[in-house]
Image (spheres, grey):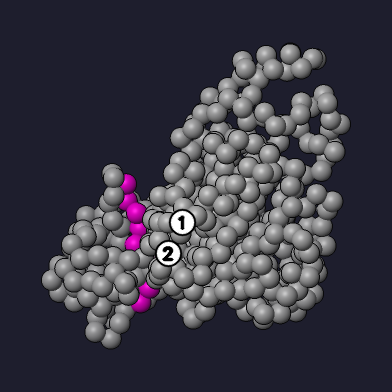
Amino acid sequence: MTYGDFDAVCKSTEVALARCGNAVKLSERLSSVEPAFMKPVTTQPAVQVASSCIRDPRSAARDVASQLRQQHLGYVLFFCSAEYDLARLGKALESEFPAIGVSGCTSAGEITSAGYDRGCITAIGFDRRYFAIECALIREMDRFSLPDAQSVIDDLLSRCRDAGLAPIKGNTFAITLLDGLSSREELVLATLNSALGSIPQFGGSAGDDEHLADTHVFYEGRFYAGAATVLLVNTPLDFRVFSTHHLAEGSEKLIVTDACPDSRTVYELNAEPAADAYARAVGTTVDALSREVFALRPLGVKIGGHYFVRSIQRVNADKSLTFYCAVETGVVMTAMQPGSLLDAVRDQLETSERIVGKPLVTIGCDCFLRRLEAELLGESEAVSNFLRDHKVVGFNTYGEQFNGMHINQTFTGVVIGQPDVYFE
């Protein structure tokens, strides 16, 4: 085959299914990648995954590094239990991956190559020949403005372009990791979304093993509270960013008649104490309200014809409800009915895999309340096995993010397809 033959094949073959709203020609997607006949095919994977449940931070970091270490390692993304000594773990990771970008956050449970786990570290190592990844730290989330966001995104885009792997358009997605107790996710995400334009985005809010005390993101050797990171991933590989939940509209409607969005507290629903109205809507009593009830019977808000979930964090002494997302006065909320969690995940991942082909890896951000629901219903093993079989690596979150929206009890992520060829 000649270069002319290869070009003709590329021009005659288009990616027929839209990926994140964009259908991109194969010839464009491979414009910076040499044809297979010009390079020997190898079996070196474009990503590697690792996990470790060793509790000593130094030993755990060394264990993960030994699993990921390879000649072309260009970036590491990890998620870890907050039970680790984070100061020591940060220094150990920096030592184990010198001159390599490392990002991550604490979690409310980990998703490893074996499925659900707890008290460990799970990580993905990206081959720099297939992925250009750049990261920025946002320190002051409550002061993050549109000019700040535009400056951050422009800088990340410039650095991704310098790598020369693939055109930015249609070949780039963003991952956001935010402090899950900051109560500033909405502000940061809406601002970043404006700057990202058509670039698809997903992510998760950092957890702390359900203690609701301290959550952290990791950047350049340190864990930060009250902060966020945004990663731009540029790749010639096919990918699809997705979001899914398994909840359906119920019949009970609740109008928010008094709320404080900044503290995410709803004082009144239907002009009565919020806990009273919610308990009656889901068929229980205020005294019986618990995280198990919240997991099984969340509320939803309809936006643009689709329901987005708003999960309750706790009942307060004055019968107000504190949520994991901001809720404003005047919003109409619906008591949602759970469907099949596993069927919803299966539908979304299998749809993605029909578009991008056999998955190289799926990076997943799965709400910790979904995992709790699966445990309560005896489905956690089946869900865990499914995630394992579909190469999902990620974490359980305190909130999920999708194209500028902050949501709850949702599974968001990206399915990345296998390379057509592997290079030496």
Does the stretch in magenta take in 109?
no
Q: Height in image: 241 above or below 296?
A: above
Query: Does residue 334 appear anywhere in the picture?
Result: yes
Query: Which residue type carries mark 1?
Result: Ala
The residue lying at 28 percent from left, 65 percent from top is 327
The residue lying at 74 percent from left, 52 percent from top is 74
* Foreground residue among 265 and 232: 232
Q: Are marks 2 and 1 in contact (CB under 8 Å)?
A: yes
Residue receiving disc 2: 144
The residue lying at 86 percent from left, 31 percent from top is 40
Find the distance from the CA under tag 2 to the CA under tag 1.
7 Å
**Residue 114 relative to residue 297: left or right:** right
Give the magenta-colored segment's residue range.
306-314
Q: Residues within 10 Å of mark 1 (few under 14, many from 20)?
A: many
The residue lying at 78 percent from left, 76 percent from top is 58
**Displayed quadrant of residue 162:** top right
Does the stretch in magenta take in 310?
yes
Labelled disc at residue 149: 1
Q: Position of residue 64 (x, y in %)?
A: 76, 64
